[in-house]
Image: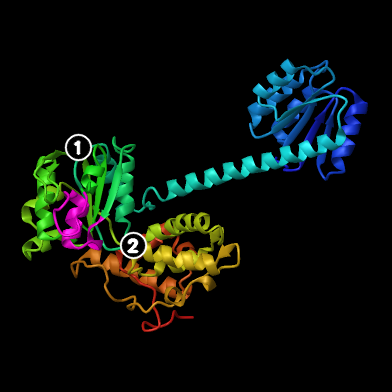
Amino acid sequence: MNADPRCVFVIDDDPDVLNLVATRLSTAGLNIRKFTNPLQAMDSIESEKPALIITDLHMPEAEGSDVLRSARQVDKKISVILMSGAGTIEAAVDAMKDGAFDFLVKPIDMSHLVELAQRAMEFNQLQRENSSLKTDMANLRKSRFAPAGSSDAMRKVMELAQAVAGTDATVLITGESGVGKELLADFVQGHSPRKTASYVKVNCGALSGSLLESELFGHEKGAFTGATDRRVGRFEQAQNGTIFLDEVGEMTMEAQTRLLRVLQQRELQRVGGTATINLNIRVICATNKDLLTEVVAGKFREDLYYRVNVFPVRLPPLRDRRADIPALSADLLRTIRVRLDRGPNGISQAALDALATYRWPGNVRELENVLQRCAILCAEDTLDVADLPSEITSPDSTAPGAGAAAAQPGTLETAREDGERRRILEVLDSCHWNMSAAATRLAISRSTLYVKLDQYRIERPGRDGGAPKS
């Protein structure tokens, strides 16, 4: 049974006192449950979970202190007020130590009791709201702590991330913009032996050459014009912890030279300084560039490439793991709802299908932006297709026949794949791209259907590709 936020247990072996208290509290709008036997009340706490219990201290069957302990075992947020006709300071102190909300001496001042009960109920509600907020924030941190997805591609990524997290090896995370490289770096750091130590993040692409060097390695007073004080760099700030270098491919050649020394010798000198500073750090890098291509072009040091690329992890683009999109969308929407304190609680299957068949050139970042916009505008409890922007529901994408999975012509495998692909397209067209209906007709799960879409590079037809057939 769900807790009634207005439910109050009143327990007293004296029927006159019991009825007096119950009647007075009822007039204050509270839902009263009366008990002359405290054992019966204690048996009902688990099932009814009252917000407040008002109980006599001394009763034949059990003490009010027994009721208090029983309530706290069920839920420590249940407020308990003890009453006694033989009130002593010691009894009151013991009750408060045991967790009672208050202690009253009979005869009871009814006006004071009502006021006290209302305060106890408000306190109970605040406790529950605080607990709910903590749970929401914990879920938020958990949901954003690791990239969501159960596709084969993401399972492989997470297996690599978990394997390297417990080491101090330098990690290079690659992938297109918006795929979640920083999130994966957070996962590695959060599962490492250094997870409780400092964690410093630097966006190398957001800083110019000299400014980046000063930011990373620090500088001495007078090292350059405007250097009026000594500055401790980000590497020093990360001492004994982890530093995350995002967009490491954007570093200047001068900064690359300094970074090479850090990775080779785990030491640095501040800009303009001569003192050597030893470092004990873990380095995680990320880039959306092909660093090997940058090496060939002379834009990235080859020796640094091999120092950075100790343990590479590539995050696939969202279009190559569309089977993850439904779960990822639901996860993102929950996160957005907590952050905005508004928005729908769920996503309809039709909307999930539309999201899963869009190409997402902006990857997870684009998906999150779309869902945030929908959360702001959607007035219903469930996000539906009508709430999605037109570029999602009618994308300008290539026709479904483009980009079919490559296979050697003339083989049995090719013939089988061609037949399977044509059948999937036929069913999708006949079902107007309703993924649930298509999966049912094909006798496969929706997740398997999404995998097939990836395998055969089947894309939903858009304005230029022709509308789905009726």
Q: Is residue 211 magenta?
A: yes
Q: x%, y% of residue 462?
A: 40, 79
Determine whether, in the image, residue 171 is placed left or right of residue 370: left
Q: Mark 2 falls on what kind of element?
A: helix
Is residue 250 rendered magenta in the image?
no
Three-letter amino acid code at the position of disc 2: Leu
To which residue does mark 1 refer? 280
**Residue at x-position 63% and y-position 31%:** 76
Q: Which residues are magenta?
A: 203-229
The numbered mark at residue 318 is: 2
Q: Is 228 on the left or on the right of 347, as rendered?
A: left
Quarter of the image where one finds residue 20: top right
Q: Is residue 126 above or below residue 291?
A: above
For the N terminus, give its image quadrant.
top right
The residue furthest right is 16
Q: Residue at x 28, y 58 (%)?
A: 316
Residue 4: x %, y % from top left:
73, 42
